């Protein structure tokens, strides 16, 4: 096999943040990767499944840094694949839902680079599982629209709400900021005060559910602290009769650091995530690990409160 044939790019969904929701296929791609280009919403523990020599490159948007342009990400994918490496482009949720996967596919095709798309658990699925409901339900909701409240150049466009007039469910990604306009649009077009649930950090330790109706939800959300984390809005009868959470989640988690042999640490970490904890492997002082990994983990440890260090 020629070197260029070896290069492959995997466009991988990392799921909603909780590592337990990662697919086995995604895990295998991460383990194989020479380079990982990851988004802001990806839990760093998921990156830690990679091999020690893997390079980690953050290409996401944070509240403090400037957004890396899509063209730059496309160029990086090509550059790294041309170095004959196995490249993983890791995105939150499912890469095919508001994940700009098509632009990346187009670039890779244009350069003749092998690639594969690996689906992930999308935020809407994670959210309704936590509401203990279906995205569709017999006799309640027969169809679903995934839409976004955020448009190019922050335009103030209307969204497609027709699903609500046909017994459907509306899942709004990136819509919390524009919730007042979106709810106003529904109110002015449809004469029904649909139930609404906003789920922040679905499936994660800091999950927070706020419920209401098209009329009441905006005030309830306005009373919350800023930066609760990513939130998805579910509108429609599947969100009926659900209680809001009463206790706000911690802004930054208390984390458990695991030190020792990697396999044992990973296995314990999964058990801890199952219990609603947040755990990372600590290899700040391990010189055999790629410097990008050490740097990221060191930053992470410095920014968060350590609850406990477990040595295995
Ligand atoms: N590809 C992703 C969506 C990317 S757009 C997916 O399939 O889920 C980013 C938006 O997704 C956020 O603004 C938020 O609306 C939603 N989102 C992502 N992760 C989430 C989570 N854990 N809980 C709630 N919403 C989430």
Image (spheres, rainbow, N blue to C red):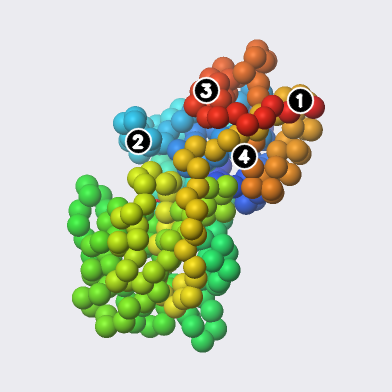
Residue 302 percent coordinates (x, y): 52, 22
User: In the image, 171: left or right of 181?
Assistant: right
Residue 307 image-quadrant placement: top right
Q: Mark 2–mark 3 contact, CB under 8 Å?
A: no
Q: Earlier in the sequence, mark 2 or mark 3?
A: 2
Closer to the chain start, of discs 4 and 3, is 4
* Quadrant of the frame with the N terminus: top right
User: Of helix, strand and loop, which one carries label 2?
Assistant: loop
Q: Earlier in the sequence, mark 4 or mark 1?
A: 4
**Label 2 vs label 4: CA separation?**
22 Å
Q: Residues within 10 Å of mark 1 (few under 14, many from 20)?
A: few
Q: Nearer the viewer, residue 108 or 124?
A: 124
Graded by Cα atoms within 10 Å as few (under 14), some (14 to 19) or many (20 or more), the crowding at tag 4 reads many
Distance between mark 4 and mark 1 Cα atoms: 16 Å
Q: Is residue 84 above or below residue 96?
A: above
Beta carbon of the mark 4 residue lies under 8 A of ligand 1: no
- Which residue is pictured at 50% across the width and 43% down the height? 250
Q: Is residue 111 visible in the rendered structure shown here?
A: no
Q: Secondary structure at mark 4?
A: strand
Q: Which residue is mark 2?
A: 63
Labelled disc at residue 311: 1
Q: Are marks 4 and 1 in contact (CB under 8 Å)?
A: no
Q: Nearer the viewer, residue 234 or 158?
A: 234
User: Which quarter of the rendered picture does the C terminus lie within?
Assistant: top right
């Amino acid at each position: 096999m020629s070197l260029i044939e070896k290069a492959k790019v995997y466009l991988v969904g990392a799921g909603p943040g909780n590592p337990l929701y990662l697919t086995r296929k995604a895990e295998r791609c991460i383990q194989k990767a020479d380079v990982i280009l990851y988004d802001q919403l990806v839990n760093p523990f998921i990156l830690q499944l990679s091999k020690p020599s893997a390079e980690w490159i953050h290409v996401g948007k944070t509240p403090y840094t400037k957004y890396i342009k899509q063209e730059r990400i496309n160029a990086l994918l090509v550059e790294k694949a041309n170095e004959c490496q196995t490249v993983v482009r890791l995105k939150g949720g499912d890469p095919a839902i508001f994940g700009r996967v098509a632009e990346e596919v187009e670039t890779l095709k244009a350069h003749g680079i092998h690639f594969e798309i690996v689906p992930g658990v999308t935020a809407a699925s994670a959210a309704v599982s936590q509401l203990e409901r279906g995205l569709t339900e017999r006799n309640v909701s027969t169809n679903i629209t995934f839409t976004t409240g955020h448009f190019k150049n922050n335009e103030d466009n209307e969204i497609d709400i027709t699903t609500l007039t046909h017994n459907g469910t509306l899942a709004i990604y990136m819509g919390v900021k524009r919730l007042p306009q979106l709810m106003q649009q529904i109110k002015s077009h449809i004469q029904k005060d649909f139930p609404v649930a906003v789920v922040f950090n679905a499936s994660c330790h800091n999950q927070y559910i706020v419920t209401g109706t098209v009329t009441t939800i905006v005030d309830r959300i306005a009373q919350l602290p800023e930066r609760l984390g990513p939130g998805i809005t579910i509108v429609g009868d599947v969100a009926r009769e659900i209680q809001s959470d009463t206790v706000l989640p911690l802004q930054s988690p208390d984390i458990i650091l695991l030190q020792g042999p990697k396999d044992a640490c990973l296995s314990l970490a999964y058990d801890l995530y199952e219990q609603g904890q947040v755990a990372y492997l600590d290899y700040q002082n391990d010189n055999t690990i790629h410097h990008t990994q050490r740097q990221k983990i060191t930053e992470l440890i410095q920014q968060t409160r350590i609850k406990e260090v477990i040595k295995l």
